[in-house]
């Protein structure tokens, strides 16, 4: 069995891409396999995107069979991509704090406010330091 814990989703992704050790035969529970995350991860690569799309189209298939399909169709190769993260918008944080609103509402407010108003809000919510 792998050095990783049996609840590690990344061990499953690694077994599909690189190690080619069938983890369900090694004792991993099927509940660890999350089709959405596995398919999202595989969709980052040109040689696995079509396989991920097939599993997205056939979401009703049991996870064991989805894993079997991907395990047998994907060629062994090291694949690495950074996880995409939401970028922080510097002008939204002061608006969120000033009005006490959510990120989504702040995005709407930015459309309504002028640059001068946004600068004034940023100045009023600025903390610490000398101006």
Image (spheres, rainbow, N blue to C red):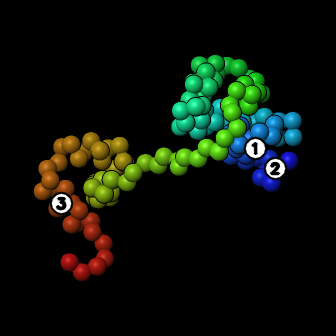
Earlier along the polypeptide chain: callout 3 or callout 2?
A: 2
Q: Is residue 107 above or below residue 64?
A: below
* Residue visible at 77% across and 52% down in the picture: 4
Q: Residues within 10 Å of mark 2 (few under 14, many from 20)?
A: few
Could you say whether the residue bearing mark 2 is in a helix, strand or loop?
loop
Q: Which mark is residue 19?
A: 1
Residue 71: give x, y in percent of width and height.
Answer: 74, 31
Q: Is residue 68 visible?
A: yes
Quadrant assignment, res 26: top right
Q: Which residue is the site of mark 3?
A: 119
Q: Which mark is residue 2?
A: 2
Mark 1 to mark 2 CA distance (whole Å): 9 Å
Residue 85: give x, y in percent of width and height.
Answer: 47, 49
Q: Residues within 10 Å of mark 3 (few under 14, many from 20)?
A: some
Could you say whether the residue bearing mark 1 is in a helix, strand or loop?
helix
Q: Nearer the viewer, residue 75 or 63?
A: 75
* Residue visible at 27% across and 65% down in the picture: 125
Q: Is residue 128 above or below residue 119?
A: below
Q: Nearer the viewer, residue 105 or 53?
A: 53
């Amino acid at each position: 069995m792998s050095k990783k814990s049996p609840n590690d989703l990344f061990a499953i992704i690694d077994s599909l891409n690189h190690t080619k050790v069938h983890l369900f035969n090694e004792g991993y529970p099927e509940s660890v396999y999350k089709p959405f995350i596995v398919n999202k991860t595989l969709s980052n690569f040109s040689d696995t995107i079509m396989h991920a799309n097939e599993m997205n189209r056939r979401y009703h298939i049991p996870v064991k069979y989805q894993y079997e399909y991907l395990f047998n169709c994907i060629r062994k190769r090291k694949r690495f991509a950074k996880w995409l993260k939401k970028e922080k918008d510097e002008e939204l944080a002061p608006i969120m704090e000033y009005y006490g609103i959510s990120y989504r509402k702040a995005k709407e407010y930015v459309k309504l406010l002028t640059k001068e108003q946004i600068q004034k809000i940023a100045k009023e919510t600025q903390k610490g330091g000398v101006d």
